[in-house]
Each structure stands twice: as C-alpha cells, then as structure tokens.
C-alpha cells in the first residue's frame, strides 16, 4: 500500500497517449507527481480516462532516461557525455558542413506526433527557415498521411468533420479498420452508450473486435473482409446505394460537384462493384453487403469512424476517399451525428500535420509552391522559402543510401523501430554523416546517431496538443524538465547554434506566431485557451469560439468532390509458401512499441504479444493453445505464442506490436500507399509453424 497523502498542488494538463486527448489533474506532493486524476471539465473526456492516461506516467522518472547530451564522431565509437553547448555546437557544425559539402537539400528533419504543436512548428521552421529546404516529414507518414490526402482531396481539409459529442446524435455507425475499445477507450465508452441507446452498428474489420458483440451491444452487421480489400467493400456499399437510388440527391446537387458525381455514379454502378462480385474478392457475403448499405443509407444520421486499418494499406488514400464518397452520397456531412471521423492513434497526429510537418505543405495545409502562402512565412521569418517540396521519410532514406542525403534531426520518433523495411532504414541511417536523435531514451535509431539530445516528457513542458476532433488542448508543465530543457528550447538552441535569430521565451509566443501565419489558428492564443479550456480549429474571426462541426454550410473546398475509387489488389499475395494473411492492432494497456508503458512499474504493462490464429488453421499445423510458433513472411520471421480463437477467420492471423522483441516490422513488407507512402502494415502474407521458442 502506498500512502499518497493529500496532494499539495495540482496542474491541469492533457494525456500524451492517444488522440482522444483526455484532460487530467496532475496532483503533486512537493515536486513528486502522485496521481493523475481524470478532469471532470475536460471537454474530450468529461472526467473519464483509460488505464494508460491514468497510470502510465512512471516512464518520466525511469532510470533509462538519458539526461545529458552525448556525441560521438562515428557510430562504432562509444558515446561521450558533453555539455549542452558542446553537443549543440558539434551538431550545428556538422549539419552546416554537410550543406557546404553536399548542398542545401542534403539534410532534413523528422517531427513527432508525440510533441506539442509549438515544438512541431519549430522543427519544420528549422528545416524551412534555417536549413532552407522543405525536407521535413512526420511520423504521421506511417499512420494517417492517407487521411490528410483523402479528406483534403474530397472535402478540402485534412481533418475529421465532427466533435466527439456528435456521436450522441448518431443513428447508424460504421466502424471500419478501428478497434476503439482498445485504441481509443474513452471515445469507445461514449460510442457504446449511444449503441446501447439504440443506434445501429456496422463493423468492417477482418477480426471480430469487441464491439461486434459485447455487453448489451450487438452489431447489426459485421463484414469480416479479407485484409487488403477495404476499397472493394466500400465501393460495394456505394454501388448498392447508387443502383438502388438510396442516395441523397438533394444534398449532392446542392453541396457537391454534380458533374463529378455523375462520372462517379457511372463508375460505381458498374457490375464489377456489385455485392456479388465483391463477395468473390473480399469474402464478405453479398447479402450482408447489401443489407449494410441499405441500413447506412436509410437509417437516419450516419457516421463513419475509422483507424489505421483503413490508412495503412497500399490503397489507404483510396479507402479514405471512398469513405468520403459514402458520406457525401448519403448526405451525411455537416450536421451533428454524421460525418467522417479518423480516430488518431497518437496524441498529436492531428497537430503535427496541421503544423506543416509534411514536405509539401506549410502550416495550415498550404502548398509550398503557393507564392502567397510562402510570402506569409517569408515575411514572418525574414527568410526566403524554397518553393520545391522536400523529401518524405522513405525518400530521405533512399537518398541517403544513394549518397545525396547526409544529415537528419529526428525528434521524438524511433524510425528504426516504427518504419517499414528495417534493413533499409538501417542502411539509410548508416549512410548519413550526422544523425541527431532528440528523445527520452536511447532508442533503436540512436544506434546510428552521432548526437543524442535528451528529450522532455509532456509533464515537463508547456504547449498544446490537438486531438482527433481538432480540439486544441493545453499541456501544462507539472515538473521541471529533468534534462534541463523542454524540447522546444532544445530545437531553438540548435537553430541558434546554426545562426538563427530565435528568441522565444515561452511556447505561448510560438502559438502567437502560428496564429499570425495560419488562418485556421488566427483566434488561438493561450489567453483564449485559458478562458475556454480548449477550442477546435478553425478558430478565427469568423469562428471565435472554434468549430465543433466542419463543412456545415459548404465544404472547405467549395463543392464536395466525388473521386472514383478503382480497387487495385495489393501486390502482397498469399500463396503456397505464405498462405495466411497477417494483420495487426493494439491492446488497451500498451502503447505502440511500449517505450513508455513498459517503463511504468505495473504488472499490467507486461503483456506479451501473441498470435491469434483460427483453431482450424492451428490444427492443420499441429499448433495448440499457448505453443510457441514461428511467424515467417517474405521479409523475415519472429516467434510468438499462439492464441487459438475464432475472432479471426480461417486464413487470417493477427498480432499486436507492443513488445520490442516481437519486431513486427521485420515481418511486414515495404509496400506503401500509392499517394502518401504510408506503409502497408496491415497485410502481410505469412506462414505459421510450430517452434521450440525464441
Ligand atoms: Fe489518454 Fe487516450 Fe486513454 Fe484518454 S483514452 S486517457 S487520451 S490514452
């Protein structure tokens, strides 16, 4: 029993795990954090929380934290602890030297969806304003970049359309490629409440997730599609709606481009999109496809919620477009209870994208080729901005292997663990002459680093995170940074070491600059956030209280745009050597590769990853419950324990990726989304065989 005592002080802040963005009261005794209490006035969570936000903060004081900067000449040498001054001088000299030798575009940055908006903004500003190129990318590349592309193309802005409250007005919900119960638990509770009150549910997922059948909830339809066939299923739903005349023609005529709709209607009416043809491709019975489409089109307010099971595919962007088409077809945009709602995995995926982390977009999703947009930042920063889009993460690695990309500043992201094709990532990093890792722990990427700059946790900084409903929440400093500096200060020191004239003394000044340069943030400042608690962008003169619902009177791009969605099968095919299809997901108590949750003292965190396999597939392989199995793909292999379950269909296996030993990315392929390069983590052809253990 631990005696916590009466807290002497409390600070309201925001959870740094998932995109729900729950508010917490951090309670302290002296300078020791003793409790995280869900904050009842938090607009995203209203006093609720999950186990991670409430208990998994111990990593902040874990002994593995690196608190002193380190440098080394070559990656085969041991690290040497140095002062901040020396580390920053070393890093700045190297990066400047690389640009002199190899050119302005030979170095770049990676921003983090774990860091604050203000920190992300500064890192992309470092690339554009100090390195003078657009080589900036974000870890959102490997999760929700197709959301940015798909919703940008169809609706005109790269964000979810609704607030979480909207679910209370929903009559029919499609959950596709998401498992909110484990991934977004606090939102899942609100969704379940609505379902228990009578809303109908359609689940599109290869696996029978909890929502399909749990206490007092039973999905009207579960469409257990073959991994990799999302586009075909979504098109089949649209086919039924169009060919049976169930679309909302008045909405389409008023709100969408009618000519484009007619082209789309002709395309989607083709018999190749019929439920019968789709059953052959996807394994989903035609009758279920037809019934689900009719329910969604005629059941009242229809909302679609989706996750990485949509985006992390070679056709991730196409599926996002298909989902947007479906919402427009049925008139389900622009009022409470409807809409297209990406469930963001990390706490600040939305914010890192909003802040201009992508190599082609300035903050506020404005293309770098746009003269007007560049002029805004050129005036604010006093520099000339390169009009040429920069390199995405995979292109940086390719260019490194080819010898033209030489230096990287990587903040809060372990690309060696989280990006696909581990061997290629390692080769790219090894070919660089200056890798600067700015992180809490000596992660896998740091094995290839020349400079290690200690990072700070969310408890040690001020700033803002933007959650999945575009809500800008305050992050408040609960304790002094153990490493001496918040991450935004470290980026500023690096920029200054490279000659920049930056003098921010508080993140509120960075937010003021964001408001000055980015129209959707024009009304956001720390006083407003203090007064209102949080606001949803766009927040500006036209919407001073923020915007809970997007596209109410018209789409951001004007008319909504229907785009044809041709299904193209992934190149990853099951065959005689690798006859099963592997797909992946999360569990409630763990977070990504466990860097934080595994460094929090609590037995809950120490679950192992297991391989879910259908009893029939297990039996023919001589595998029993709990046995070790070898999971092999064309890329690599790993060992896991088997869990026999009919949650997965025959021919499909499933695992989580939380334990570093699992090394799921050794198994996955290097196929990626055609539009954004988001890796195809959700489909890998594999074989499973008995094993004696790791
Ligand atoms: Fe944190 Fe997400 Fe859990 Fe809320 S639901 S406490 S934001 S991990």
Image (tube, rainbow, N blue to C red):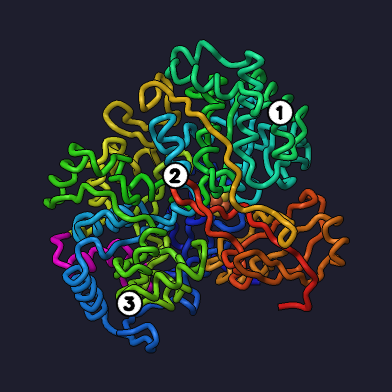
Work out how far the residue at label 1 is from the one at label 2, CA to CA, in angstroms. 27 Å
Q: Residue 275, which numbered label?
A: 1
Could you tell me if the residues under marks 1 and 3 are in contact, i.e. CB atoms within 8 Å? no
Residue placed furthest toward the front: 576
Q: Residue 387, which numbered label?
A: none
Callout 3: 10 Å neighbours few (<14), some, many (20+)?
many
Q: Specify whether 501 is left or right of 235.
A: left
Could you tell me if the residues under marks 1 and 2 are in contact, i.e. CB atoms within 8 Å? no
Q: Specify whether 364 is left or right of 138.
A: left
**Judging from the image, what secondary structure is the residue with disc 1 in?**
helix
Residue under label 3: 451
Q: Residue at x 44, y 44 (%)?
A: 675
**431 vs 576: above or below:** below
**Residue 471: percent from the left, percent from the top?**
43, 41
User: What segment carries the magenta color?
Assistant: 480-502
Q: Specify whether 451 is left or right of 1.
A: left
Residue under label 2: 675
**Residue 522: percent from the left, percent from the top?**
26, 37
Q: Nearer the viewer, mark 1 or mark 3?
A: 1
Decide if residue 197 is in sight here: no
Residue placed furthest toward the top: 250
Work out how far the residue at label 2 is from the one at label 3, CA to CA, in angstroms. 33 Å
Quarter location, residue 178:
top right
Callout 1: 10 Å neighbours few (<14), some, many (20+)?
many
**Residue 483: percent from the left, percent from the top?**
35, 74
């Amino acid at each position: 029993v631990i005696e916590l005592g009466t807290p002497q002080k409390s600070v309201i802040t925001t959870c740094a795990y998932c995109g729900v963005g729950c508010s917490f009261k951090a309670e302290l005794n002296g300078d020791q954090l003793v409790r995280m209490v869900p904050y009842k006035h938090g607009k995203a969570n209203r006093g609720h929380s999950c186990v991670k936000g409430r208990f998994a903060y111990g990593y902040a004081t874990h002994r593995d934290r690196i608190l002193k900067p380190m440098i080394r000449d070559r990656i085969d040498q041991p690290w040497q602890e140095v002062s901040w001054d020396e580390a920053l001088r070393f890093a700045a000299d190297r990066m400047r030297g690389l640009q002199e030798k190899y050119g302005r575009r030979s170095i770049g940055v990676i921003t983090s969806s774990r860091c604050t908006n203000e920190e992300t903004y500064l890192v992309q500003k470092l690339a554009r304003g100090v390195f003078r190129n657009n080589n900036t990318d974000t870890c959102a590349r490997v999760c929700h970049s197709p959301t940015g592309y798909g919703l940008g193309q169809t609706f005109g802005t790269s964000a979810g359309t609704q607030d979480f409250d909207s679910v209370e007005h929903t009559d029919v919900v499609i959950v596709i490629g998401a498992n909110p119960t484990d991934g977004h638990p606090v939102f899942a509770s609100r969704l379940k409440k609505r379902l228990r009150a009578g809303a109908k549910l359609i689940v599109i997922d290869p696996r029978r997730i909890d929502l399909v059948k749990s206490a007092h909830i039973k999905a009207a339809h579960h469409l257990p599609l073959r991994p990799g066939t999302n586009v075909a299923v979504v098109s089949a739903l649209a086919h039924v709606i169009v060919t049976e005349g169930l679309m909302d023609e008045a909405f389409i005529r008023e709100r969408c481009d009618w000519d484009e709709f007619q082209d789309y209607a002709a395309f989607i009416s083709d018999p190749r999109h019929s439920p019968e043809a789709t059953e052959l491709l996807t394994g989903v019975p035609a009758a279920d496809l037809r019934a689900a489409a009719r329910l969604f089109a005629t059941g009242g307010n229809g909302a679609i919620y989706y996750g990485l099971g949509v985006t992390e595919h070679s056709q991730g962007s196409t599926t996002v477009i298909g989902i947007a088409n479906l919402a427009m077809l049925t008139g389900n945009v622009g009022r409470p209870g409807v809409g297209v709602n990406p469930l963001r995995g990390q706490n600040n995926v939305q914010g890192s994208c909003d802040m201009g982390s992508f190599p082609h977009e300035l903050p506020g999703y404005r293309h770098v080729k746009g003269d007007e947009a560049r002029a805004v930042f050129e005036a604010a920063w006093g520099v000339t901005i390169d009009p040429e889009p920069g390199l995405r993460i995979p292109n940086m690695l390719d260019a490194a292997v080819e010898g033209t990309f030489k230096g990287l500043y990587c903040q809060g992201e372990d690309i060696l663990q989280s990006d696909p094709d581990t061997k290629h990532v390692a080769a790219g990093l090894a070919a660089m002459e200056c890798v600067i890792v700015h992180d809490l722990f000596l992660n896998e990427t740091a094995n290839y680093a020349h400079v290690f700059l200690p990072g700070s946790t969310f408890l040690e900084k001020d700033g803002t995170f933007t959650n999945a409903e575009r809500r800008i929440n305050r992050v408040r400093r609960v304790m002094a940074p153990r490493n001496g500096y918040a991450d935004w200060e470290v980026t500023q020191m690096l920029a200054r070491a490279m000659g920049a004239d930056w003098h921010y003394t508080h993140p509120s000044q960075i937010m003021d600059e964001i408001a000055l340069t980015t129209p959707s943030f024009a009304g956001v400042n720390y006083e407003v956030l203090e007064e209102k608690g949080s606001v949803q962008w766009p927040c500006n003169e036209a919407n001073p209280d923020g915007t809970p619902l997007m596209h109410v009177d018209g789409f951001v791009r004007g008319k909504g745009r229907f785009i044809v969605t041709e299904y193209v099968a992934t190149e990853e095919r099951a065959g005689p050597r690798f006859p099963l299809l592997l797909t992946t997901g999360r569990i409630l108590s763990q977070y990504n590769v466990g860097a934080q949750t595994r460094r929090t003292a609590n037995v809950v965190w120490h679950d192992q990853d297991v391989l879910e396999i259908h009893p029939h597939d297990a039996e023919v392989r001589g595998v029993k419950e709990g046995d070790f199995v070898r999971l092999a793909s064309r890329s690599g292999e790993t060992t896991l324990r088997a869990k026999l379950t009919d949650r997965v269909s025959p021919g499909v296996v499933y695992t989580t990726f939380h334990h570093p030993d699992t090394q799921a990315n050794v198994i996955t392929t290097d196929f990626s989304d055609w539009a954004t390069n988001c890796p195809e983590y959700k489909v890998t052809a594999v074989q499973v065989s008995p094993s004696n253990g790791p």
